[in-house]
Image (cartoon, helix red, strand yellow):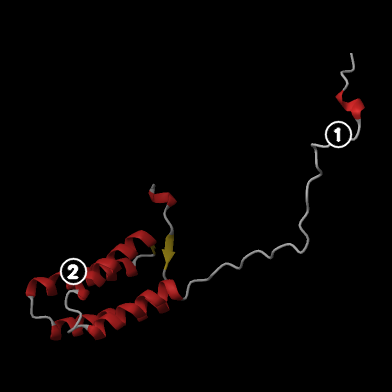
Amino acid sequence: MLEDDRVQLEIESDYRTKIHEILITIRKIVNQNVSDIGLKERIFEKIRLLSEEIDRERTTVEKFGSILISLSHDIGESAENLEPAVEKLERIKKIFWGSSVKNKELPTPKERKELPDLTSKNDESEDEIPF
């Protein structure tokens, strides 16, 4: 898929602020509850990457989603200790996917229109060759 074909996100400043606040809270929770230094560093790196994507004027759904999923996976490794962080990630997901505008379906027509039956031959003169 070409870069131009990807769905672009423009994040409003209010949402940016909310997401950054949530990421700061997740960072604090991880810092207090994760003892594995390697895991902690991976989570912090993904928080940084997600924060950078949030700060861009535009980002792609694919890029944002892949970082968020990767961060969710790493946090999931310590799920018992990081339940509050999981709840915060769910809030970020809801900002983007839970509050998206849904298109209304087109109404179904009340009466179904049919094409005339072309298989019946009402006028035999149509079958004659004129020359």
- Badge 2 or badge 1: first in the primary sequence: 2
The furthest residue to the top: 131
Query: Which residue: 52% across, 71% down?
Result: 101
Query: Which residue: 76% across, 64% down?
Result: 110
Q: Is residue 96 left or right of residue 102?
A: left
| SS at badge 2 | helix
Let me know if residue 118 appears in the view.
yes
Eyeballing the image, is 123 above or below 82? above
Q: Is residue 51 left or right of residue 16?
A: left
Look at mark 1 in the image and give the residue it sits on: 121
| SS at badge 1 | loop
Q: Marks 2 and 1: which is nearer the front?
A: 1
- The numbered mark at residue 45 is 2
Percent position of residue 51, x then y: 28, 71
Let me know if residue 25 appears in the view.
no
- Where's the C terminus, which quadrant? top right
Q: Callout 1: few (<14), some (14-19), or many (20+) C-alpha neighbours within 10 Å?
A: few
- The numbered mark at residue 33 is none
Eyeballing the image, is 72 above or below 124? below
Q: Is residue 37 left or right of residue 56?
A: left
Percent position of residue 18, x then y: 36, 81
Number of numbered labels in the structure image:
2
Query: Which residue: 42% across, 64% down?
Result: 9
Percent position of residue 8, x then y: 43, 60
Q: Is residue 102 left or right of residue 107?
A: left
